């Protein structure tokens, strides 16, 4: 058994001294007399190879302490565990743990990776903004490997029934982020797939579509006379009137381009890339709509003759960009446009609902009205291109 007296006499070049109290424990000499390195030599129970495991420097680590440590390691080896392999595994686990992102970091990385797949810039912003509003405040700083279905249920619970459509989108986006994490080895599987088991049943999709405040269709003619045909004809007036008359989405109107208009056939063809259903939509134009657009075209041609560069968009800012959706929202707010929802102003999108009610009460078929709105209709019969145009006083 190795003693301190013997250990203090070790010199550079000496053979390693075995401490017989623990099998495989050696003191290897260093370049300085009276000091050495403790080594436990053993055969790995995992690989079958000989391993040398350093246990510290003598005399910093005294004989009594190194024996206790070596004895514990020997017990571990007898149990079939290689202590060096165990250390390596623990270090790898710590390294991997340090690489595991928080939910917010993972969501933003997913958002960046999939940037090219969003329909447009607005959809891209909405995607991350819903998570920032509903999820990040609760679990944004939590590592994804620590998240459970209950955590996501807690995020969704406040809006699960009151804003069912939004909640459904948030759930889908959370699931997409967690599946992205699983694909990268941060987690085994997404816990979001079972989150609905922790929440009450939502209403059907038809019932849960969030209503956009709409102006009752009988009030539309008066609104047009008093606010669109009275006073200065601003860009907001022209855009909103066309939204009302064509029943298109405001974004489709704001991005209307001259090359989409066929003045000869009086058809406006919106390409599939700009449509929600990803199918081209052909909008018939009444003589009034056509005259309005021809007047705008004359103004455009006059600007070009005056030296301005030709623009692609029918409605464009001075910077030759499309107007934001706020141009119509602000106009309706300023005019305090009445809606069918108490305490709320009518929205531009709501005029599609006004059109739908008008078409129904005017005796037009459901299929024809849905086609005019560019809604997808299952098992729809083939319909002619012509569709009813919302008729308002002063716009034949």
Image (tube, grey):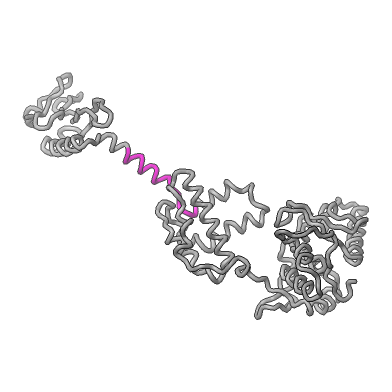
Q: Which residues are magenta?
A: 89-105
At 81% across and 60% down in the image, what residue appears?
Answer: 383
Q: Residue at (53%, 70%) from the top-left corner?
A: 161
Q: Is residue 366 above or below residue 381?
A: below
Image x and y of residue 336, in percent: 73, 78
In the displayed structure, does residue 358 sit left or right of residue 82?
right
Q: Quadrant of the N terminus?
A: top left
Is there any visible trace of residue 369 in the rendered image?
Answer: yes
246 relative position to 62: left or right: right
The residue sitting at the top extreme is 13
Place of residue 210 in the rendered image (x, y in percent of width and height, measured from the top left): 63, 69
Above or below, 218 relative to 76: below
Instruction: Tell me which residue sits at (14%, 22%) in the image.
Output: 11
Confirm whether the magenta stretch covers residue 96. yes
Locate residue 340: give its quadrant. Answer: bottom right
The answer to whether residue 227 is above or below residue 6 is: below
Residue 315 in which image quadrant = bottom right
Q: Please identify the quadrant where the C terminus is shown.
A: bottom right
| Viewer-side residue, 316 vs 184 | 184
């Amino acid at each position: 058994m190795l003693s301190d007296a013997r250990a203090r006499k070790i010199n550079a070049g000496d053979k390693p001294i075995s401490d017989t109290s623990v099998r495989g424990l050696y003191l290897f000499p260093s370049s300085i007399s009276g000091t050495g390195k403790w080594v436990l030599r053993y055969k790995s129970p995992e690989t079958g190879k000989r391993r040398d495991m350093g246990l510290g420097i003598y005399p910093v680590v005294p004989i009594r302490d190194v024996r206790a440590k070596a004895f514990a390691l020997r017990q571990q080896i007898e149990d079939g565990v290689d202590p060096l392999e165990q250390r390596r595994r623990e270090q790898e686990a710590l390294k991997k743990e340090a690489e595991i992102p928080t939910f917010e970091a993972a969501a933003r990385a997913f958002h960046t990776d999939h940037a090219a797949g969003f329909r447009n810039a607005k959809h891209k912003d909405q995607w991350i903004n819903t998570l920032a509003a509903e999820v990040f405040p609760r679990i944004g700083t939590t590592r994804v490997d620590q998240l459970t279905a209950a955590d996501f249920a807690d995020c969704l619970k406040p809006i699960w029934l009151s804003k069912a459509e939004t909640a459904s989108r948030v759930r889908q986006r959370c699931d997409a982020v967690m599946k992205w994490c699983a694909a990268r080895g941060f987690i085994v599987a997404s816990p979001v797939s079972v989150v609905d088991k922790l929440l009450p049943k939502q209403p059907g999709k038809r019932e849960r579509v969030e209503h956009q405040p709409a102006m009752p269709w009988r009030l539309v003619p008066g609104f047009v006379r008093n606010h669109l045909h009275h006073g200065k004809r601003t860009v907001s007036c022209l855009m909103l009137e066309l939204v009302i008359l064509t029943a298109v989405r405001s974004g489709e109107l704001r991005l209307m381009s001259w090359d989409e208009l066929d003045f000869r056939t009086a058809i406006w063809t919106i390409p599939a890339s700009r449509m929600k259903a990803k199918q081209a939509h052909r909008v018939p134009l009444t003589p009034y709509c056509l005259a309005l657009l021809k007047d705008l075209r004359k103004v455009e041609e006059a600007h070009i003759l005056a030296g301005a560069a030709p623009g692609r968009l029918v409605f464009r800012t001075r910077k030759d960009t499309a107007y934001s959706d706020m141009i119509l929202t602000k106009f309706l707010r300023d005019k305090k446009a009445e809606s069918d929802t108490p305490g709320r102003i009518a929205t531009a999108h709501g005029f599609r609902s006004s059109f739908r009610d008008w078409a129904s009460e005017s005796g037009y078929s459901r299929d024809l009205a849905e086609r005019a709105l560019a809604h997808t209709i299952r098992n729809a019969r083939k319909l002619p291109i012509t569709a009813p145009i919302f008729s308002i006083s002063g716009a034949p």
